[in-house]
Image (cartoon, rainbow, N blue to C red):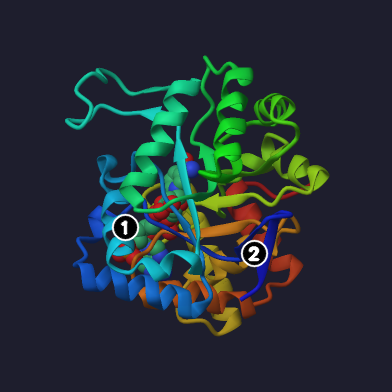
Amino acid sequence: MEKVKLSPHLEVSRIALGFWRLMDWKMTFNELEHLVEESLNLGVTTFDHADIYGEYQCEEAFGRLLRAKPTLRNKFQLITKCGIKVVSPKFPNQKINHYDTSYDHIIESVDQSLRNLNADHIDLLLIHRPDPLMNPEETARAFFQLKASGKVLNFGVSNFSIIQFEMLNKYFGGMLVTNQVEFSPYCLEHFQNGNMEFFLKQKIHPMGWSPMAGGALLNPTDEKGRRVHKKLQQIAGELGLDFIDQVIYAWILYHPSMVIPIVGSGKPERLKSAVDAMKIQLTREQWYEIFIASQGYSLP
Ligand SMILES: NC(=O)c1ccc[n+]([C@@H]2O[C@H](COP(=O)([O-])OP(=O)(O)OC[C@H]3O[C@@H](n4cnc5c(N)ncnc54)[C@H](OP(=O)(O)O)[C@@H]3O)[C@@H](O)[C@H]2O)c1
Protein backbone atom coordinates (compact mmCIF):
# COMPACT_ATOMS: atom_id res chain seq x y z
CA MET A 1 0.00 0.00 0.00
CA GLU A 2 1.26 3.41 -1.00
CA LYS A 3 1.95 5.77 1.92
CA VAL A 4 1.49 9.52 2.08
CA LYS A 5 3.80 11.60 4.21
CA LEU A 6 1.77 14.20 6.08
CA SER A 7 4.72 15.38 8.17
CA PRO A 8 8.32 14.31 8.73
CA HIS A 9 6.95 12.10 11.52
CA LEU A 10 3.65 10.88 10.12
CA GLU A 11 2.98 8.60 7.17
CA VAL A 12 -0.58 7.50 6.50
CA SER A 13 -1.95 4.90 4.13
CA ARG A 14 -3.19 6.23 0.77
CA ILE A 15 -6.65 5.06 1.80
CA ALA A 16 -8.01 5.49 5.33
CA LEU A 17 -10.91 3.85 7.15
CA GLY A 18 -13.44 5.96 9.05
CA PHE A 19 -15.34 4.85 12.12
CA TRP A 20 -18.09 7.46 12.21
CA ARG A 21 -20.74 4.81 11.52
CA LEU A 22 -19.33 2.16 13.84
CA MET A 23 -22.39 2.09 16.11
CA ASP A 24 -24.70 1.82 13.05
CA TRP A 25 -22.72 -1.21 11.88
CA LYS A 26 -23.88 -3.01 15.07
CA MET A 27 -20.77 -5.17 15.06
CA THR A 28 -19.90 -7.81 17.56
CA PHE A 29 -16.44 -7.62 19.11
CA ASN A 30 -15.28 -10.39 16.73
CA GLU A 31 -16.65 -8.60 13.68
CA LEU A 32 -14.82 -5.40 14.64
CA GLU A 33 -11.63 -7.36 15.21
CA HIS A 34 -12.08 -8.99 11.78
CA LEU A 35 -12.60 -5.60 10.10
CA VAL A 36 -9.48 -4.13 11.72
CA GLU A 37 -7.38 -7.16 10.83
CA GLU A 38 -8.66 -7.22 7.25
CA SER A 39 -7.95 -3.52 6.97
CA LEU A 40 -4.38 -3.98 8.20
CA ASN A 41 -3.92 -6.91 5.81
CA LEU A 42 -5.00 -4.65 2.95
CA GLY A 43 -2.49 -2.02 4.08
CA VAL A 44 -5.18 0.41 5.23
CA THR A 45 -3.43 1.46 8.43
CA THR A 46 -4.99 4.86 9.07
CA PHE A 47 -8.12 4.95 11.23
CA ASP A 48 -10.27 8.03 11.54
CA HIS A 49 -12.30 8.73 14.67
CA ALA A 50 -13.80 11.70 16.51
CA ASP A 51 -14.78 12.16 20.14
CA ILE A 52 -18.42 12.74 19.16
CA TYR A 53 -18.88 9.81 16.75
CA GLY A 54 -21.82 7.56 17.61
CA GLU A 55 -22.96 10.01 20.28
CA TYR A 56 -19.59 9.71 22.03
CA GLN A 57 -19.59 5.89 21.86
CA CYS A 58 -17.41 4.95 18.85
CA GLU A 59 -14.03 5.63 20.44
CA GLU A 60 -14.99 3.50 23.43
CA ALA A 61 -16.17 0.60 21.27
CA PHE A 62 -12.90 0.72 19.33
CA GLY A 63 -10.96 1.04 22.59
CA ARG A 64 -12.42 -2.25 23.85
CA LEU A 65 -10.65 -3.94 20.96
CA LEU A 66 -7.38 -2.23 21.87
CA ARG A 67 -7.75 -3.26 25.52
CA ALA A 68 -8.14 -6.91 24.47
CA LYS A 69 -5.46 -6.73 21.76
CA PRO A 70 -2.93 -4.08 22.83
CA THR A 71 -0.36 -5.26 20.28
CA LEU A 72 -2.60 -3.92 17.50
CA ARG A 73 -1.89 -0.33 18.55
CA ASN A 74 1.51 0.05 16.90
CA LYS A 75 0.16 -1.30 13.60
CA PHE A 76 -1.93 1.74 12.67
CA GLN A 77 -2.13 5.52 12.83
CA LEU A 78 -4.89 6.74 15.10
CA ILE A 79 -6.69 9.96 14.20
CA THR A 80 -9.28 11.60 16.35
CA LYS A 81 -10.95 14.99 16.52
CA CYS A 82 -12.22 17.45 19.08
CA GLY A 83 -13.89 20.83 19.24
CA ILE A 84 -17.57 19.97 18.76
CA LYS A 85 -19.91 19.62 21.73
CA VAL A 86 -23.21 17.92 20.96
CA VAL A 87 -26.34 17.41 23.02
CA SER A 88 -26.02 13.99 24.63
CA PRO A 89 -27.15 12.20 27.80
CA LYS A 90 -23.41 11.74 28.47
CA PHE A 91 -23.02 15.51 28.86
CA PRO A 92 -26.27 16.88 30.34
CA ASN A 93 -24.70 20.35 30.71
CA GLN A 94 -24.44 20.69 26.93
CA LYS A 95 -27.82 22.20 26.08
CA ILE A 96 -27.16 22.98 22.40
CA ASN A 97 -24.74 21.74 19.76
CA HIS A 98 -21.81 24.16 19.63
CA TYR A 99 -18.04 24.41 19.17
CA ASP A 100 -15.32 24.73 21.77
CA THR A 101 -11.66 25.14 20.85
CA SER A 102 -10.59 26.50 24.22
CA TYR A 103 -7.39 25.25 25.87
CA ASP A 104 -9.32 23.49 28.66
CA HIS A 105 -11.73 21.72 26.35
CA ILE A 106 -9.03 20.47 23.98
CA ILE A 107 -6.91 19.11 26.82
CA GLU A 108 -9.92 17.45 28.51
CA SER A 109 -11.19 16.06 25.24
CA VAL A 110 -7.84 14.44 24.37
CA ASP A 111 -7.53 12.92 27.85
CA GLN A 112 -11.02 11.48 27.46
CA SER A 113 -10.26 10.16 23.95
CA LEU A 114 -7.09 8.46 25.20
CA ARG A 115 -9.09 6.79 28.00
CA ASN A 116 -11.85 5.76 25.58
CA LEU A 117 -9.44 4.41 23.01
CA ASN A 118 -7.17 2.67 25.53
CA ALA A 119 -4.26 4.38 23.85
CA ASP A 120 -1.31 6.29 25.24
CA HIS A 121 -1.03 8.59 22.25
CA ILE A 122 -2.92 9.88 19.25
CA ASP A 123 -1.03 10.15 15.97
CA LEU A 124 -3.09 13.00 14.59
CA LEU A 125 -5.56 15.30 16.33
CA LEU A 126 -7.90 17.45 14.22
CA ILE A 127 -10.02 20.42 15.18
CA HIS A 128 -13.30 19.09 13.82
CA ARG A 129 -14.87 22.31 12.55
CA PRO A 130 -13.94 25.98 12.47
CA ASP A 131 -15.10 27.67 15.67
CA PRO A 132 -16.22 31.30 15.28
CA LEU A 133 -14.96 31.88 18.81
CA MET A 134 -11.57 30.27 18.28
CA ASN A 135 -8.72 32.13 19.94
CA PRO A 136 -5.84 30.73 17.87
CA GLU A 137 -3.28 31.55 20.55
CA GLU A 138 -5.19 29.43 23.06
CA THR A 139 -5.82 26.57 20.64
CA ALA A 140 -2.15 26.52 19.65
CA ARG A 141 -1.14 26.58 23.35
CA ALA A 142 -3.19 23.40 23.86
CA PHE A 143 -1.49 21.82 20.82
CA PHE A 144 2.01 22.72 22.08
CA GLN A 145 1.15 21.30 25.51
CA LEU A 146 -0.21 18.03 24.03
CA LYS A 147 2.83 17.71 21.79
CA ALA A 148 5.24 18.30 24.67
CA SER A 149 3.47 15.67 26.80
CA GLY A 150 3.64 13.13 23.95
CA LYS A 151 -0.13 12.59 24.09
CA VAL A 152 -0.58 13.83 20.51
CA LEU A 153 2.14 13.60 17.88
CA ASN A 154 0.65 15.63 15.00
CA PHE A 155 -2.09 18.21 14.55
CA GLY A 156 -4.44 19.32 11.80
CA VAL A 157 -7.89 20.68 11.12
CA SER A 158 -11.08 19.68 9.38
CA ASN A 159 -13.53 21.67 7.27
CA PHE A 160 -11.33 24.80 7.44
CA SER A 161 -11.14 27.50 4.77
CA ILE A 162 -7.77 28.82 3.59
CA ILE A 163 -7.82 31.79 5.96
CA GLN A 164 -8.93 29.67 8.92
CA PHE A 165 -6.09 27.22 8.22
CA GLU A 166 -3.52 29.99 7.83
CA MET A 167 -4.63 31.73 11.00
CA LEU A 168 -4.23 28.72 13.26
CA ASN A 169 -1.12 27.57 11.44
CA LYS A 170 0.54 30.93 12.09
CA TYR A 171 0.07 30.51 15.84
CA PHE A 172 1.14 26.86 15.70
CA GLY A 173 4.48 27.49 14.05
CA GLY A 174 3.40 26.20 10.63
CA MET A 175 3.03 22.65 11.97
CA LEU A 176 -0.55 21.81 10.90
CA VAL A 177 -0.28 18.72 8.71
CA THR A 178 -3.66 18.35 7.00
CA ASN A 179 -7.17 19.62 6.47
CA GLN A 180 -9.87 16.93 6.35
CA VAL A 181 -12.60 18.10 3.99
CA GLU A 182 -15.62 16.69 2.19
CA PHE A 183 -14.43 15.46 -1.20
CA SER A 184 -16.27 13.42 -3.81
CA PRO A 185 -17.62 13.76 -7.33
CA TYR A 186 -20.78 15.03 -5.61
CA CYS A 187 -19.03 17.67 -3.51
CA LEU A 188 -16.86 20.05 -5.56
CA GLU A 189 -16.86 22.73 -2.84
CA HIS A 190 -13.09 22.78 -2.40
CA PHE A 191 -12.52 23.36 -6.12
CA GLN A 192 -14.70 26.42 -5.79
CA ASN A 193 -13.32 27.94 -2.56
CA GLY A 194 -9.62 27.75 -3.53
CA ASN A 195 -8.73 25.05 -1.00
CA MET A 196 -7.49 22.57 -3.66
CA GLU A 197 -5.01 25.12 -5.01
CA PHE A 198 -4.03 26.08 -1.46
CA PHE A 199 -3.26 22.41 -0.63
CA LEU A 200 -0.99 22.14 -3.66
CA LYS A 201 0.72 25.45 -2.92
CA GLN A 202 1.36 24.46 0.70
CA LYS A 203 2.18 20.83 -0.17
CA ILE A 204 -0.61 19.69 2.14
CA HIS A 205 -2.27 16.36 1.45
CA PRO A 206 -5.95 16.69 2.37
CA MET A 207 -8.06 13.86 3.74
CA GLY A 208 -11.38 13.40 1.93
CA TRP A 209 -14.48 12.53 3.92
CA SER A 210 -17.71 11.00 2.57
CA PRO A 211 -16.21 9.73 -0.69
CA MET A 212 -19.59 8.22 -1.65
CA ALA A 213 -21.33 11.43 -0.49
CA GLY A 214 -22.63 9.43 2.46
CA GLY A 215 -24.27 6.99 0.01
CA ALA A 216 -25.95 9.71 -2.11
CA LEU A 217 -23.77 8.87 -5.12
CA LEU A 218 -24.83 5.23 -4.94
CA ASN A 219 -28.55 5.84 -4.35
CA PRO A 220 -29.11 9.34 -5.66
CA THR A 221 -31.96 11.38 -4.24
CA ASP A 222 -31.59 14.64 -6.18
CA GLU A 223 -30.94 15.87 -9.70
CA LYS A 224 -27.19 16.36 -9.26
CA GLY A 225 -26.83 12.92 -7.68
CA ARG A 226 -28.73 11.32 -10.59
CA ARG A 227 -26.59 13.15 -13.17
CA VAL A 228 -23.31 12.06 -11.57
CA HIS A 229 -24.59 8.53 -10.93
CA LYS A 230 -25.50 8.11 -14.61
CA LYS A 231 -22.07 9.35 -15.71
CA LEU A 232 -20.32 7.06 -13.19
CA GLN A 233 -22.28 4.11 -14.55
CA GLN A 234 -21.29 4.98 -18.11
CA ILE A 235 -17.61 5.18 -17.16
CA ALA A 236 -17.79 1.98 -15.09
CA GLY A 237 -19.10 0.32 -18.29
CA GLU A 238 -16.23 1.75 -20.34
CA LEU A 239 -13.74 0.39 -17.80
CA GLY A 240 -15.46 -2.99 -17.52
CA LEU A 241 -16.28 -2.49 -13.84
CA ASP A 242 -19.34 -4.02 -12.18
CA PHE A 243 -19.98 -1.17 -9.77
CA ILE A 244 -19.38 2.57 -9.60
CA ASP A 245 -17.65 2.73 -6.21
CA GLN A 246 -14.25 2.11 -7.82
CA VAL A 247 -14.81 4.84 -10.40
CA ILE A 248 -15.50 7.24 -7.51
CA TYR A 249 -12.32 6.25 -5.64
CA ALA A 250 -10.29 6.44 -8.86
CA TRP A 251 -11.67 9.95 -9.47
CA ILE A 252 -10.66 11.04 -5.95
CA LEU A 253 -7.22 9.42 -6.18
CA TYR A 254 -6.54 11.17 -9.50
CA HIS A 255 -6.14 14.64 -8.01
CA PRO A 256 -2.49 15.76 -7.71
CA SER A 257 -2.88 16.92 -4.11
CA MET A 258 -3.10 13.21 -3.21
CA VAL A 259 -6.41 13.35 -1.37
CA ILE A 260 -6.64 10.49 1.12
CA PRO A 261 -10.18 9.09 0.80
CA ILE A 262 -11.70 7.92 4.08
CA VAL A 263 -13.77 4.82 3.42
CA GLY A 264 -17.07 4.96 5.29
CA SER A 265 -18.12 1.33 4.96
CA GLY A 266 -17.49 -1.28 7.63
CA LYS A 267 -17.72 -4.11 5.11
CA PRO A 268 -14.28 -5.59 4.40
CA GLU A 269 -15.21 -6.36 0.78
CA ARG A 270 -16.08 -2.68 0.19
CA LEU A 271 -12.80 -1.61 1.76
CA LYS A 272 -11.00 -4.03 -0.56
CA SER A 273 -12.88 -2.54 -3.50
CA ALA A 274 -11.51 0.90 -2.50
CA VAL A 275 -7.98 -0.48 -2.31
CA ASP A 276 -8.34 -2.21 -5.68
CA ALA A 277 -9.46 1.10 -7.20
CA MET A 278 -5.87 2.29 -6.78
CA LYS A 279 -5.08 0.22 -9.88
CA ILE A 280 -7.69 1.99 -12.01
CA GLN A 281 -6.52 4.85 -14.18
CA LEU A 282 -9.19 7.15 -15.54
CA THR A 283 -8.37 9.19 -18.60
CA ARG A 284 -8.22 12.96 -18.12
CA GLU A 285 -11.39 13.20 -20.21
CA GLN A 286 -13.23 10.68 -18.00
CA TRP A 287 -12.21 12.69 -14.91
CA TYR A 288 -13.59 15.84 -16.53
CA GLU A 289 -16.78 14.13 -17.65
CA ILE A 290 -17.55 13.32 -14.01
CA PHE A 291 -16.57 16.83 -12.88
CA ILE A 292 -18.83 18.39 -15.51
CA ALA A 293 -21.73 16.07 -14.67
CA SER A 294 -21.48 17.25 -11.06
CA GLN A 295 -21.08 20.89 -11.97
CA GLY A 296 -24.09 20.69 -14.24
CA TYR A 297 -22.66 22.67 -17.18
CA SER A 298 -19.85 22.20 -19.68
CA LEU A 299 -16.58 24.04 -19.53
CA PRO A 300 -15.98 27.05 -21.78
N1 LIG B 1 -14.31 15.60 9.32
C1 LIG B 1 -15.61 15.56 9.15
O1 LIG B 1 -16.33 16.55 9.37
C2 LIG B 1 -16.23 14.28 8.69
C3 LIG B 1 -17.60 14.25 8.33
C4 LIG B 1 -18.13 13.04 7.88
C5 LIG B 1 -17.34 11.90 7.81
N2 LIG B 1 -16.02 11.97 8.19
C6 LIG B 1 -15.15 10.77 8.12
O2 LIG B 1 -15.27 10.21 6.83
C7 LIG B 1 -15.61 8.83 6.95
C8 LIG B 1 -16.40 8.40 5.74
O3 LIG B 1 -17.60 9.16 5.64
P1 LIG B 1 -18.95 8.46 5.19
O4 LIG B 1 -19.27 7.35 6.14
O5 LIG B 1 -19.99 9.48 4.96
O6 LIG B 1 -18.45 7.78 3.81
P2 LIG B 1 -19.22 7.37 2.47
O7 LIG B 1 -18.46 6.25 1.88
O8 LIG B 1 -19.47 8.58 1.66
O9 LIG B 1 -20.64 6.87 2.95
C9 LIG B 1 -20.80 5.68 3.66
C10 LIG B 1 -22.16 5.12 3.31
O10 LIG B 1 -22.11 4.67 1.97
C11 LIG B 1 -22.27 3.26 1.93
N3 LIG B 1 -21.22 2.70 1.08
C12 LIG B 1 -19.90 3.00 1.11
N4 LIG B 1 -19.23 2.28 0.18
C13 LIG B 1 -20.15 1.51 -0.43
C14 LIG B 1 -20.06 0.58 -1.47
N5 LIG B 1 -18.91 0.27 -2.05
N6 LIG B 1 -21.21 -0.02 -1.86
C15 LIG B 1 -22.38 0.29 -1.30
N7 LIG B 1 -22.51 1.16 -0.27
C16 LIG B 1 -21.41 1.77 0.15
C17 LIG B 1 -22.10 2.75 3.33
O11 LIG B 1 -22.93 1.64 3.53
P3 LIG B 1 -22.37 0.30 4.28
O12 LIG B 1 -21.96 0.75 5.66
O13 LIG B 1 -23.57 -0.59 4.26
O14 LIG B 1 -21.24 -0.25 3.48
C18 LIG B 1 -22.54 3.94 4.17
O15 LIG B 1 -23.94 3.96 4.34
C19 LIG B 1 -16.35 8.74 8.29
O16 LIG B 1 -16.32 7.44 8.84
C20 LIG B 1 -15.54 9.69 9.12
O17 LIG B 1 -14.37 9.05 9.59
C21 LIG B 1 -15.47 13.13 8.61
The CB of the residue at mark 2 lies under 8 Å from ligand 1: no
Q: CA distance from mark 1 to mark 2?
A: 28 Å
Q: Residue 52: which quarter of the image?
A: top left
Q: Nearer the viewer, residue 179 or 140?
A: 140
Crowdedness near tag 1: few (<14), some (14–19) or many (≥20) residues, C-alpha within 10 Å: many
Specify whether 43 is left or right of 89.
right
Decide which of 141, 267 is in the foreground and name it.
Answer: 141
**In the displayed structure image, the side of residue 2 where residue 67 appears, left or right:** left
Picture residue at 41% right of the left edge, 50% below the top: 49
Q: Is residue 241 above or below residue 172?
A: below
Q: Secondary structure at mark 1?
A: helix
Query: Which numbered marker is on residue 16?
Result: none
Q: Is residue 238 above or below residue 220?
A: below
| Residue sitting at x 54%, y 27% | 130
The three-letter code of the residue at mark 2 reads: Leu
Q: Characterize the local packing of mark 2: few (<14), some (14-19) or many (20 or more) Cα atoms within 10 angstroms.
A: many
Q: Which mark is residue 62?
A: 1
Image position, residue 51 (x, y; %): 37, 40
Q: Are marks 1 and 2 in contact (CB under 8 Å)?
A: no
Ranked by sequence position, the earlier of labels 1 and 2 is 1
Q: Residue at x 49, y 20 (%)?
A: 102
Where residue 93 sits in the image (x, y, percent)?
23, 18
Q: Residue 253: which disc?
A: 2
